[in-house]
Amino acid sequence: MALFPEMTVAENIGFSEVVGHGLRLVDYGRIRAIALEALAKLGVSLDVDAPLKEFPIAQRQIVAIARALVGEARVVFMDEPTASLTQSETDHLLDIVRNLSASGVAVVFVSHRLAEVLEISSRITVLRDGRLVGVYPAEGMTQSKITELMTGRTFEAKVRAAPRADRPVVIEVDGLSRPGQFSDISFKVHEGETLGITGLLGAGRTELAMTLFGMLKPAAGRIRLDGREVRFSSNRDAIDAGIAYLSEDRLSLGLIQAQSIVDNLVISSLARILSGGLISPGKKTSLVGKWVAELGVKIGKPEDAITTLSGGNQQRIAIAKWLATDPRLLILDAPTVGVDVGARAGIFDIVARLADSGLAIILISDEVPEVYFNADRILHMAQGRVVGSYDPRAYSLHDIEAAVYG
Amino acid sequence: MSALIQRLNGAPFVRDMAGPGFAFLAVLIVFSLASPQFLSGATFGSVAFQLPELGLLTLAMLMPIITGGFNLAVTFTANMAGLTVAWILEANGGVDASPEVFAFAVVVAIGVGALAGFVMGLVIAFTRAHPILVSLSMMIFLRGLGEFLTRGGDVSGFPEFLHPIGHGSILGIPVPMLVFLVCVALWHLLLSRSRLGFNTYMIGSNIEATRYSGINTRRVVILVYTLSGAMCAIAGIIMMARFNSVRVGHGESYVLITVLACFLGGVHPDGGFGKALPVFVALIDLQMLSSGLNILGANQHLATAVWGLLLITVMISRWLVLRLRSNFASSRR
């Protein structure tokens, strides 16, 4: 969001109207008045003198919208305004958008959450690969039709879940806790099983994953890998023990954007490509060739920067980087963030293949359909605790969504 | 032109060498035309004798810069190591000290340099303080300590057998140059083929993502600064042998030149990219330029100014090449 966290709500909303007018002095009274007026238009009341950083992300989003309204805006573009909001916050935001268009402001609402798009729009424009596919009236549209238009393919969503409890347990977590982040988490993941973990942002999912990956230390509880209790003092220990963690933040933590495809792929498994203590260019090339072929990654040259790849292909490289460490357990944290709808199916095909080959997988996502269709079991986390456990074959998607997004 | 650019895009080695290579040819051609004496053994000799001091200090600067940091303490670390050698020789007979004492002194001096680097690396790795501030503090500490211990004066009076290390030649190649060439080869191998080198580049681009990949980033940072300090010590020993004396402030003006030599050699100022061999060529460029101006009878201060001009020219032409390349890339689409 193009906002200034250190400045007050009033300054964030009013500054563009005041900057560069007449005398170059700042009229704080006027800024306040402008801010209050804009918020009133949205039917929201906020403490305009408080610094923006004190507000949760949903209210910052509203401040961003209020700023767009300053100066009698007649068209407002909203680019993924709900990406980090919960369902109730999203509902509130959609109400605001409805009021706005009722008052005569035209709104362009960009989103990849198709349910919202259907709910809020009167017309829907579909783009694919930078080209216009078409403009359609929202009435009579369905999510699957939009997906088909977006990707040019039809997807049949099918529950992949199957019983795997007869296979050996790979990881067993017992009473794992970290104060303020998660408490008393227990579960098992078997060979070839995919455990889905869902819940809203801030439910403690990522912290749990980082603890399994040895980057955070548990305050209480035990982790057993293949029956033996493990304690990690760093993520290197976890990697050597066979745990891999695909970060939710591919751009700044998952891959090193400035560096090459090959270097990103081998970074976690350098010990496997040594020859006489030095990195062997030959082994490096063959490792890259193997994984690029195995995961069907479309690349130019291995020496090209990772930024030359699409989101989906970058994610495949990120997965390959971890597969190259020969893991027993692969933790995928939000693996489809920044990956377009068409390429998501490809990512999940890979996940299914890996599970079939015997890898234990933990799939973390805040999009319930992702875990519903791709996991064998689903844990629902809220406020650091496991509050529900579901078998996708026994529950409908709607039931689980109602429980999670509530 | 476009075919040339395509080739430059294609081969990484050629691309890395392009900047310093062009500068090399430009300096060579301009001075050969300007003075018939330029292409002679004397020029080669003066370049080969003067280059190693600056060169070794530049190698010491190179690895910290690739991690996205700096080591501003290079010259004072070097002189501190030189002083260590001088004191050990002094305490064991001065001009009559034995080669064994010297060998021992060299080992201790490299240890002193490495220790200075280790401390900087430790502070940078654990406190995440900016490397400029940390190395600046180390630089001031070493300067103050050195001036206190030497009362600001020179330490001299070394055994006769030290003379060839600063002034001798083997097979026509000056000894300091041989030491430098070995160090360049070592740094090249370290950066291009070792795990430490690989991790150095990754840390320079994104230290957090590197840590998430299972690399002990603190250990890498500490090692990089420790190696940098050890390389400073080698530079300090060579400087001692060349000048036949050690003073805390010797070569103080080199600090910023080492940074610029790195950039001339294509090292990325934000870290993550840069190779030893192009930096080696860039150093030769700078030294040839200065020797050439000297032959033409130009003032030494003017030579420094011309270095500055050369670097500014390089920045502008690099920008032009990048623009040409991206124009070419978009026209191909």
Image (tube, coloured by chain):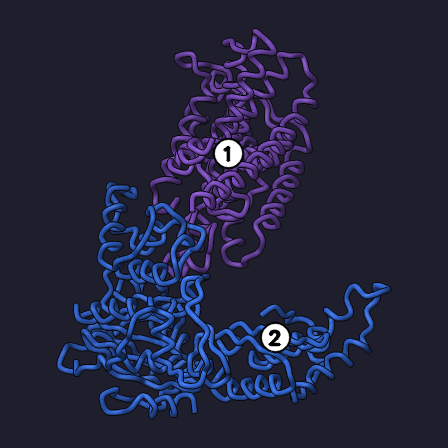
Q: Please report the residue visible at 32 percent of the width from the left and 52 percent of the height from the top.
A: A299
Q: Please report the residue visible at 65 percent of the width from the left and 30 percent of the height from the top.
A: B308
> In this picture, is A252 found above or below A196?
above
Q: Which residue is at the front of the view, A34 or B209? A: A34
> How dense is the environment of label 2, judged by Cα within 10 Å: few (below 14), some, or many (20 and up)?
some
- Look at the image and tell me in which quarter the N terminus of chain A lies: bottom right
Residue A65 figure quarter: bottom right
Horizontal and vertical percent position of residue B82: 54, 30
Horizontal and vertical percent position of residue B259: 57, 37
Amino acid carrying label 2: it is: Val
Q: Which residue is mark 2?
A: A76
- For the residues marked 2 and 1, what is the alpha-carbon distance in whole angstroms? 49 Å
Q: Which residue is at the front of the view, A205 or A176? A: A205
**Colour displayed for chain B in the image of the structure:** purple
Tag of residue B265: 1
Amino acid carrying label 1: it is: Gly
**Colour displayed for chain A in the image of the structure:** blue
Horizontal and vertical percent position of residue A229: 25, 74
Marker count (numbered): 2
State whether residue B105 appears in this view.
no
Residue A153 figure quarter: bottom left
Q: Which residue is at the front of the view, B282 or A270? A: B282
Left or right: residue A79 compared with residue A224: right
Horizontal and vertical percent position of residue B63: 47, 42
